[in-house]
Image (spheres, rainbow, N blue to C red):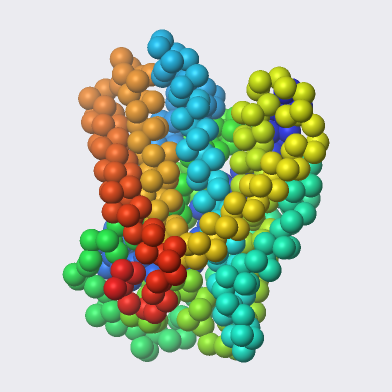
Amino acid sequence: MEKVMLNRCRFESVASGKHFASRLFGIFVLGLPYALLHSGYSGMFLIILAAVFCCYTGKILIACLDTYEDIANACCKKRFPKLGGIVVNVIQVMELIMTCILYLVVSGNLLSHSFPYLRVTEKTWSVIAFVTLLPCVFIKTLSIVSKLSLLCSLVHFIIIFIVMSYCLTQIHQWSWTRFRLSIEFEDFLVSVGVIIFSYTSQIFLPTLEGNMKNPKEFSCMLNWTHFFACLFKTAFALTALLTWGEETKEVITDNLPSSLKTLVNLCFLAKALLSYPLPFFAVTEILHTCISSSNHSDYRAPLFIVVLRGLALLFTLLMALFIPHFALLMGLTGSVTGAVMTFLLPSLFHLKLKWGKLVFLEKCAAISLFIVGFLCSLAGIALLFPLLPTFISSQIPTGPNSLFS
């Protein structure tokens, strides 16, 4: 048990900061232009609003206690001492698993559009990407992977710069009429989820703050990272949408000319595959910690750990094959787990633990964010989950039209 927790702490101290930056500026920005296409002018406002809300909830979360799990347990300690931690772990596992699935889905998409002359489906490419990830089962430390992921993040910024530079060369074709004034509610809901998911990193903030040399600088760091993330995402999504308009695809690099597409897609592919081990390692460590808490010696055996990781890896592949729809998966994850972890729970914990110390405006802000998180999650469950059977049956639209046309 102590060894498991030590490994988990090692992951958090080494990778939490890098994963936080990766989530804010990472590969999932590829879906933002498509989200902006289906949300119109309101999408630009949502990108800004989400940055403000996520920055604020990050601060109030840190103001409570040391870790997300500790905060949750403190809120439930009178009647159900462990319930809060269990709920947080379940939601965290769901979000990390969905992140892994998204990496596989986007890998299949990038490979498919990099080699269109090969008669290989996106699902088959996802399986090929999965094979390259099999060594994840035997990972004991993420130090090397974390360094490679950081290096790949630098390449990621260069590639984003190339995409935006290409868009600027097409400035003579830009037209604001490409923004929608009327939107479909289902499409808008998916767009909201995509935008929220691109900001969700609250689960890593307590650990990140605890590992800073000067924790007093955490608030300032949070302000600047969210400011630049908002500026970057707005500029990227806007230039891409103004360039391609209604032709904007789910993964924006698919819109690039063939001379650039293969190079850019392969760079993003490397980024996706190198980013996969971080959430995968985290989720398997959480699952192993929960299972081995019974002190059963078999659950702590190396073979059991390998089998557990193998099953988790296979599960992400099966989900990627059943629902190979990047925008839907991002929207679903952002609307449900993203809204809960980013808006609902931080505001609820803040109200529960700090009620007597909060001024009126702080109470109003926390209550408002709780309502926003609750509505987003409720809408995601009520409207997006019923659509999953349609996508699982492979009746998935791939064109630039409405997600649900």
> Left or right: where does residue 83 sit relative to residue 263?
left
> Left or right: where does residue 315 sit relative to residue 323?
right
Say which quadrant the C terminus sits in: bottom left
> Left or right: where does residue 205 sit relative to residue 339?
right
Residue at image location 19% in from the left, 71% down from the top: 181
Q: Is residue 261 visible?
A: yes
Q: Is residue 71 visible?
A: no
User: Measured along the vertical axis of the image, is residue 136 above or below residue 103?
Assistant: above
Q: Residue furthest left?
A: 182
Number of numbered discs on residues: 0
- Of 138 and 266, nearer the camera is 138
- Of 364 and 80, nearer the camera is 80
Q: Position of residue 165 (x, y in %)?
A: 51, 79
User: Measured along the vertical axis of the image, is residue 387 above or below residue 1?
Assistant: below
> Left or right: where does residue 147 sit relative to residue 85?
right
The image quadrant of residue 260 is bottom right
- Of 252 and 309, nearer the camera is 309
Q: Position of residue 42 (x, y in %)?
A: 26, 61
The image quadrant of residue 362 is top left
Residue at image location 26% in from the left, 27% down from the top: 363
Residue at image location 43% in from the left, 66% down from the top: 393
